[in-house]
Image (cartoon, rainbow, N blue to C red):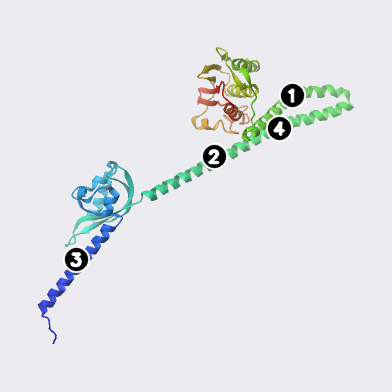
Amino acid sequence: MGMIMGHDAVGSEFARESNDGQIAVRALLSAIVDSSHDAIVSKTLDGIITSWNGGAEAMFGYRAAEVIGKSIRLIIPSDRQAEEDYVLSRIRRGLRVDHFETVRQRKDGSFLDISLTVSPVRGAQGTIIGASKIARDITERKRFEREREQLLAQEQTARMRLNEALKARDQFIAVAAHELRNPLNVLHLTLQLLQRACRDPQRSAQALALAEKSQLHFDRFASLVDRLLDVARARSGNLDLYREDLSLSGLLVEVASRFKAERPDILITVETGPDIRGSWDKLRIDQALTNLISNAVKYGGDKPIAIAAAADAGDAMITIRDRGIGISAPDLPRIFELFERVAPGSEGGGFGIGLWITRRIVEAHGGTLRVESEPGVGSTFTVRLPMNARSTD
């Protein structure tokens, strides 16, 4: 015959099982918290840490015994302390803080990006007695986002540069077409006159006079063709050098003299000191110096131009200084690019080839070309050429 439990015994058994169930639930929750990779922390309304799981130890580097009883501000960077005031103010009003992305500091002083969720903790009477915080490490995600932003910025910069290059190319084509059209038109007209002169000897003098006046146009035509050929050679790596023992001082005086004859209204001074000699390609160095002095004349107005050459630590150093319009800082890195013009809006803006070719010539000799400039003050171009270096072309 079965035994019947009394009412008190049943109630006692139920209470024991209920208590055991609560203990089991607490143990399960504790195990989940301890095994979580996220940092799970509880704190008082004053920010004092009351629990610190294994995830928090791994994430921040502090053991639980080191932080329990201390302020949570221990892991908050000095410039972010106001964030804790904001979080606690919301918790005291019974409000959650969801997915708050911020930065916290590890024990070793390093920083990490985290996402915080903070919730109020209520006591038996429903009053708010503290806060529970879950922190997730989002450092890798943030790093990926930053890298993506950098790639996007680089792509935008590359696209902008491409558009600028295309614009510069189109401007060059327009200038080149204009420069080519003029001599071709003159050549066509001259040929027509020569044809008529064959039938009418009186027209021959008129045809010869026109041909002489057209010489400048043909020179420009030949110069443009030569520069385009130089561009093709340089870009294909075929800018050949024919080195010889050369007096750089003498060449510099020779080139400057040509400009003095053409522009007697500009004071051009040349200071060379002792003769500087080296193994260089005379025609190419002449071309580079001509481009640089021409640039100074073109953008220097009628102000003096100072040219100097000196030996310096095994190099020949040449400086060409003008006091003209100068170049703005944003434009300085671009002036040596192909088809870029120093001042496109100025008279005789050029083709945007000269400085590009000049740098290639200098670098083919193992040298360097630099520029310093300030708007309204002028520009100084500095060439350094190794006296006995081998060609780098």
Q: Secondary structure at mark 1?
A: helix
- Which residue is rendered at x = 72% and y = 26% of the image? 217
Q: Secondary structure at mark 4?
A: helix
Instruction: Calculate the distance from the C-alpha at mark 4 to the C-alpha at mark 2.
Output: 28 Å
Which label was assigned to residue 23? 3
Sequence-wise first label, 4 or 2: 2
Between 249 and 149, the residue placed more toward the observer is: 249
Residue 6 lies in quadrant: bottom left
Location of residue 253 with respect to 118 vertically, above or below? above
Amino acid type for the residue under numbered disc 1: Gln
- Rendering coords of residue 337 (x, y %): 57, 33
Residue indicated by mark 1: 215
Mark 4 or 3: the one toward you: 3
- Rendering coords of residue 301 (x, y %): 58, 21
Sequence-wise first label, 3 or 1: 3
- Tell me the crowding category of disc 1: few under 14, some 14 to 19, or many 20 or more residues within 10 angstroms, Cα based: few
Which label was assigned to residue 161? 2
Amino acid type for the residue under numbered disc 3: Ile
Residue 343 lies in quadrant: top right
Residue indicated by mark 4: 180
Between 279 and 186, the residue placed more toward the observer is: 279
